[in-house]
Image (cartoon, rainbow, N blue to C red):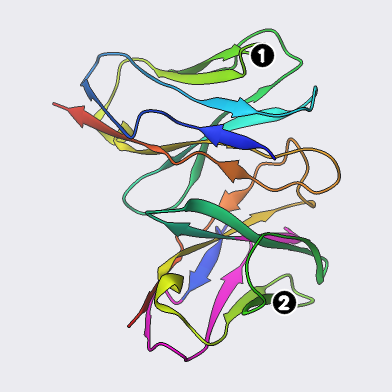
Amino acid sequence: KAGVTQTPRYLIKTRGQQVTLSCSPISGHRSVSWYQQTPGQGLQFLFEYFSETQRNKGNFPGRFSGRQFSNSRSEMNVSTLELGDSALYLCASSYGTLKRNTEAFFGQGTRLTVV
Amino acid sequence: AQTVTQSQPEMSVQEAETVTLSCTYDTSESDYYLFWYKQPPSRQMILVIRQEAYKQQNATENRFSVNFQKAAKSFSLKISDSQLGDAAMYFCAYPGGGSNYKLTFGKGTLLTVNP
């Protein structure tokens, strides 16, 4: 069974540009959540999508957005990139929507560098 | 707001020895789960062990066990017979409560295993 696949693995963008990251969940999983990992702030929750609907959102500016398609694949978009957006972006999938006992399966992340 | 604190940024252990990683958390919920995740250099987060707050028995998964002290809101991870492959970042995580679940992570502990 294939795991969570994130593409691309590495990305370098210029300040002011926009970027789209992709996440394909484990087959059969309908929930996809996104996390930003930086040395200073650690791991922070961005948002969760379930059945094409955003279920929950973290404390990030509106420049961070996402969507989920009917096949459960999800994309995350960051517009008007800032240097501080440089981070590892992790995607996690689960069968059902996140609950208190949900095991989330993570991908290997996309390393975004903004120059 | 829920918080998760890992007070040990780095720990080291000799191969075959035992090491304990600390975690404290804050929540007003009474029924919840707690997780320990491992992030090796490959960057993929892997669930190591989970504990349900209502279960008095500490969870155990092979060489990994927890010491869960609900009243003290403490959730430490013990790794017995440490192996070189245990070297990684370890994150304590709390999925939250209410109607909006999301994983809140500690800042992590970098574990080095010395041969």
Pointer 1 indicates a residue of which chain? B
Q: Quadrant of the N terminus of chain B?
A: top right
Residue A28, compared with residue B16, is above or below; it is below
Which amino acid lies under the numbered mark 2 shown in the image of this protein?
Arg
Element assignment for label 2: strand
What's the CA distance linking mark 2 and mark 1? 38 Å
**Which span is picked out in magenta?**
A8-34
Determine contact: label 2, label 1, CB under 8 Å.
Answer: no
Q: Quadrant of residue A44?
A: bottom right
- The answer to which of B7 and A6 lies nearer the viewer is B7
Residue B19 in magenta stretch: no
- In the displayed structure, does residue A112 sit left or right of residue A98? left
Provide the residue designation for mark 2: A67
Q: Is residue B62 visible?
A: no
Residue that extends furthest to the left in the rendered view of this protein: B115
Label 1 packing within 10 angstroms: few (<14), some (14-19), many (20+): some
Q: Looking at the image, which residue is at 86% across and 45% down?
A: B99
Q: Give a yes or no on whether discs 2 and 1 share a subunit.
A: no
Q: Looking at the image, which residue is at 68% across and 59% down?
A: A58
**Looking at the picture, how far across and down is residue A4, in whole percent?**
56, 61
Which amino acid lies under the numbered mark 1 shown in the image of this protein?
Lys
- The answer to which of B106 and A91 lies nearer the viewer is B106
- The answer to which of A30 and B25 lies nearer the viewer is B25
Pointer 2 indicates a residue of which chain? A
